[in-house]
Image (cartoon, rainbow, N blue to C red):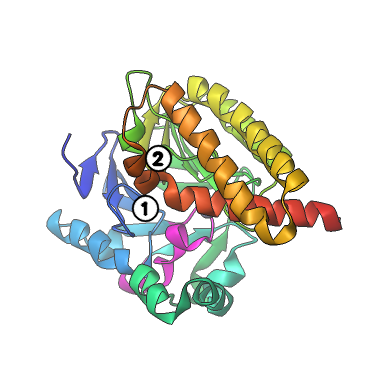
Amino acid sequence: MPFQTYQDLGHGITRIDTAMVREELAACYLLQSNDEFAIIETGTHNTVPIILSLLESRGIDRCAVRYVIPTHVHLDHAGGVGGLMEALPEATLLVHPRGARHMIDPSKLKAGATAVYGEKLFAEIYGDILPVEESRVRTMNDGDKAQVGERCLVFYDTPGHARHHFCVHDPASGGIFTGDTFGLSYPPLTTASGPFIMPTTTPVQFDPPALKASIEKLLSLNPERMYLTHYGVVENPQALGERLVPMVDDYVALAEKAAGYAKADTLENALMTAMRDYLFGKVREHGCELPDAELDAVLGMDIKLNSQGLAVWLGNRQSA
Ligand SMILES: [Zn+2]
């Protein structure tokens, strides 16, 4: 199917491409029930006009958006929160208790991202990060619920990728908005064997046992589908989970092996080589025949982020 910025997924859910870096990298979702709406994930500040133009094209009153819901405060998920909240006067921000203060005062997030990317690239990728008034923020604990029209969304604490991460169960669609907890699955890697799924270990809070427990917790809700941020809806989550959970252990094993022979200054490179070899092997096993250069284009950024995250995890474990 040709690329679409907005894709109607049924069940009153529309997938929106955030236009971050490249097509089909990061998604956010518009959810509707009767005449009420919620936006789950926001992309970056540069995504805000894309979301607003969907509302406008559908004749949706901006005041009908009740909630803005980032699954966690990494910037590809929550970078657009402040800008979106400014444009949606009736919306309440629903966020994990550990993420709320960074939405109210995003200066740390901004400083962190600017330190990594530099001013210019930060502006290009993320645009800006605006603060949210504290009175418009509601923190959601494990088991908390929010009503959108006739839909009741249920929030589950899901640490492992990040400690400020929750997932959102939507019984009306039988789906869960999984953020980064249920891994990544990029459409170009889908084959006759189905979507290719892989865990993500973005810095700085990767916690393997917690991540596996969170994935099991999601599967115990017996979902029919998962709405991934990276990227789009995937069906048959139980089978995907069976592939995903052992890959968390594989990541840990390859990190430990790399740590065994690499000096500290070359650890990240060793991890990147091991991660690339591992993921390319898995993708080939899955039946994907894209040339290596295209695989690098699809997976390169995650290979780097995963390696950085594993290096941080190894370092924390050593100092613990
Ligand atoms: Zn993340």
Quickly name the residue at label 1.
38
Residue 103 is situated, as x and y percent measured from the top left of the image, at 53, 70
Which type of secondary structure does the marked residue at label 1 adopt? strand
Q: Which mark is first along the chain, 2 or 1?
A: 1
Q: Nearer the viewer, residue 115 or 108?
A: 115
Q: Nearer the viewer, residue 126 or 56?
A: 126
Start and end of the magenta stretch? 69-90
Quickly name the residue at label 2.
151
- For residue 297, above or below residue 242: below
Which type of secondary structure does the marked residue at label 2 adopt? strand
- For residue 22, above or below residue 83: above
Residue 14 is situated, as x and y percent measured from the top left of the image, at 27, 44
Query: Callout 2: 10 Å neighbours few (<14), some, many (20+)?
Result: some
Residue 266 is situated, as x and y percent measured from the top left of the image, at 66, 57
| Residue type, label 1 | Ala
Q: For this view, does 40 lie left or right of residue 312?
A: left
| Residue type, label 2 | Arg
Residue 313 is situated, as x and y percent measured from the top left of the image, at 71, 52
Q: Nearer the viewer, residue 88 or 81?
A: 81
Number of marks: 2
Whether residue 163 can be seen here: no
Residue 178 part of the magenta-drawn span:
no
Q: Nearer the viewer, residue 229 or 256?
A: 256
Residue 84 part of the magenta-drawn span:
yes
Whether residue 282 can be seen here: yes
Q: How far apart are marks 1 and 2 (CA)?
A: 10 Å
User: Which residue is rendered at x = 42% and y = 30% of the image?
Assistant: 196
Q: For this view, does 289 lie left or right of residue 247?
A: left
Which quadrant does the N terminus fall into?
top left
User: Which residue is rendered at x = 43% and y = 81% of the image?
Assistant: 119
Of tags 1 and 2, the one toward the viewer is 1
Q: Residue furthest right?
A: 320
